[in-house]
Amino acid sequence: MKKHVALACGAAALLLAAIPVSAGPPANSWYVAPEAIYLWTDRDRLADDDLGGALAFGRSFDKWDVELQYNYVSPDTLGNGSLDFNNYFVNLHRVFYRDARISPFLKLGVGYVDPHYSSTSPLFGADVSTFTLAYGAGLLTNLTRNESRGTALALRAEIYGLVSSSTEPPNGDHLSDTVAGLGLQYHWGAPVAAAPAPVAPPVAPPVGDSDGDGVNDNLDKCPGTPAGTAVDANGCELDSDGDGVVDRLDKCPGTPAGAKVDANGCEFDSDRDGVVDSKDQCPDTPAGDKVDEVGCSFNLRLEVFFDTDSATIKPESYPDLDRAVRLMTTNDRLSGTIEGHTDSRGSDAYNQKLSQRRADSVRQYLIEKGVPASRLDAVGKGESNPIADNATAEGRAQNRRVLLVRTSQ
């Protein structure tokens, strides 16, 4: 049972050892390994299990260790005697993961077992010395390593079986013992890496001015500026008016701070009325309207819809009327007259009254939306000022119109 437990512990240790971690005991070195061992004896030896000691001396190579090992155990025997159990072995260790912190190995050895029983033992005088085969496994766990001296110290753990062939009675023709060992393995004489040659400090290259703008390359945040271009302390082209277009490309220098400009550095004229946005007090004038110096229309034609023979404004007219409200409320110096016009159908007198009622409706709408009444008049023009031919439907539609005519200059 004890043998089974020991073998299971050895297998678990090997599984843990299979994971490489960090540098282990060095190859191409000498080593010495003292161990404490525990011997489970074959029952035919008529001896107890007991503790003992071992000492190994060897040489490590790339994948193999070769060593000489001596074991000694002195267990009790029947009859209150003792057994001096001496083992002499030559072992080969196949080492895996030599450069890992934990390096497992397989053990195979051949040696000579020379047991001697005391005079009170039942086997006193029996010749049970024999050549023996050792087989097993172990692991080396590196504790410390000095690369500059070529030394290392590792914890060594192993478990292995001893198989002997003996023809002397009463042992029968086979003996099988098991040994578990735990100790230290000290290495010396490993190759020492040559000290790296001193590296001369890098020489800083001379600082130049690749683009010739007067700012050295190590300070130039805008390399590659065209020759002769005026730059700031960072080597970037000047933008005197701060509009985002450098002076070299700016066709409209001196634009006001914050003004929205195009790729040429010129201010936008969003409604294309000839007045730039920063000066345009009426930024949504309809295309084609005649405007003053602040971009406001002189006469604003309103798209106002009424039912037939009615002065009630239809809802689809509100967006256009609200544009007029914005014009009047954002420019308090503006004043104007609402003019109502009709086509030629109907009598002159009737059309005159209808155009007046409609002009009054529009004026009232603007007043209710916030335009001061003092700045608005309303007049009906009837059919007196046609702008198209009343003989056609298209012409009559153009003649039925409402205008906001500016009276302020």
Image: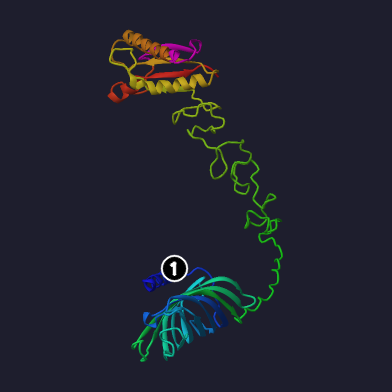
The residue stretch that appears in magenta: 366-384
The residue under label 1 is 16
Q: Dividing the picture into quarters, in which one does residue 121 lie?
A: bottom left
Q: Nearer the viewer, residue 378 or 178?
A: 178
Residue at position x 61%, y 36% in the image: 257
Q: Is residue 84 magenta?
A: no
Residue 71 relative to residue 365: left or right: right
Q: Is residue 378 magenta?
A: yes
**Crowd rating for badge 1 (residues with CA inside 10 Å; few <14, some 14–19, many 20+):** few
Q: Position of residue 206 (x, y in %)?
A: 71, 65
Q: In this rendering, does residue 373 appear at all?
A: yes
Residue 54 relative to residue 202: left or right: left
- The secondary element bearing badge 1 is classed as helix
Q: Quadrant of the N terminus?
A: bottom left
Q: In this rendering, does residue 389 appear at all?
A: no
Q: Position of residue 248 (x, y in %)?
A: 62, 49
Q: Quadrant of the C terminus?
A: top right
Q: Give the residue type that dot 1 points to.
A: Leu
Q: Position of residue 189 (x, y in %)?
A: 61, 82
Q: Nearer the viewer, residue 27 or 87?
A: 87
72 vs 268: above or below = below
